[in-house]
Amino acid sequence: MAKNNYDITIRARSGDEVTFWGSKFDDEGNEPRHIGYSGLSGLGEPERRTTSTVKSGADGGLVVARDQQYSSRIVSFTGFVMTRSSEELTKYRRAIARAMPIREYVQVFIAAPSGDVYGAQAVVSRCKTELVHSDQSNTVMDFDIDLICPDPLWQDYSSSDANQVRVTKVKPGGLHWGKTNLNWSSSGLKWSSGGSVPVATNNGSDVVYPTITIAGTVTSPVISNLTTGESIRVPIALGADDTLEVDMDNESIKLNGHNTPSSSIIGSWWGLIPGVNRLQYTSNNQSDTAQVVVSWRNRYTEVW
């Protein structure tokens, strides 16, 4: 069970949000919080699904390790609102209801004591209210809240911006003819060391599927993860003002902000494995000038 020094924020698509504070007082330590929680669970590693079969007529069984999966994450806690009037309680109840609508996904953010912030998409499966105490001095109401996160891994929202790496075409090394060919005294045969291969470092604990943004003139761009040996080619021609967004996580493509069929892609929707990933960008024309940026947020199995 997690300690009560984590802050929980739930945000609806409308932008309405509510924060259940883990501390009893504000940041200055002066004013008591009117809204908080107790009994937080579900921040650790999610349950693992393991497929196994029994050996017929023999001891033991068979387990396929590579088929293991994480189950959906369930985050549970009891929130409370403590106010001095029924009118103030009504205000908080309505704010909580707007932040946790039915039939919609919400974003849940966990602010850890370390200052790191983790986020996940969730559905509010339970929000049961109960009036605990009411008298002339204060009114207290509890909220039993369950959140189901279909993607059980936490994304790193410690920074408002995602991690980014610019992937440029690597210039080939070796001997190259200059403009004057065999005129050795004036830019004839030259040696070039070539360019370095850009890298993306995934500091998370699991594979993350990035978004690749390609802006500018290019024909059939190919973006490769040399570390995993995977690549994706988009057979399309972009003009100078065009922008192509390749969403590896949702396996979708947008051209200038509009969805475009992804069935024509060649290769695989690859991800960034934990650690260093060497990336490469090529195309059908060496003179293509498109800029390529790979963006992602690290993902973690648990909150620290």
Image: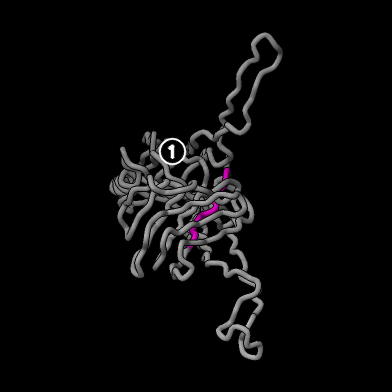
According to the picture, the residue beneath numbered tag 1 turns out to be 147
Q: Residue at x 52, y 61 (%)?
A: 281
Amino acid at the residue labelled 1: Leu
Q: Position of residue 245 (x, y in %)?
A: 40, 57
Quarter of the image for residue 301 reads top right
Q: Residue at x 49, y 53 (%)?
A: 210
Q: Is residue 7 visible?
A: no
Magenta-colored segment: predominant secondary structure: strand
Q: Is residue 204 magenta?
A: no
Q: Residue at x 32, y 51 (%)?
A: 260
Which residue appears farthest toward the top when viewing the image?
57
Judged from the image, the secondary structure of the residue bearing numbered disc 1 is strand
Q: Is residue 45 visible?
A: yes
Most foreground residue, 263 or 248: 263
Q: Residue at x 39, y 41 (%)?
A: 140
Most foreground residue, 190 or 145: 190
Which residue appears farthest toward the bottom when viewing the image?
185
Q: Position of residue 39 (x, y in %)?
A: 52, 38
The stretch of residues the image draws in magenta is 293-301
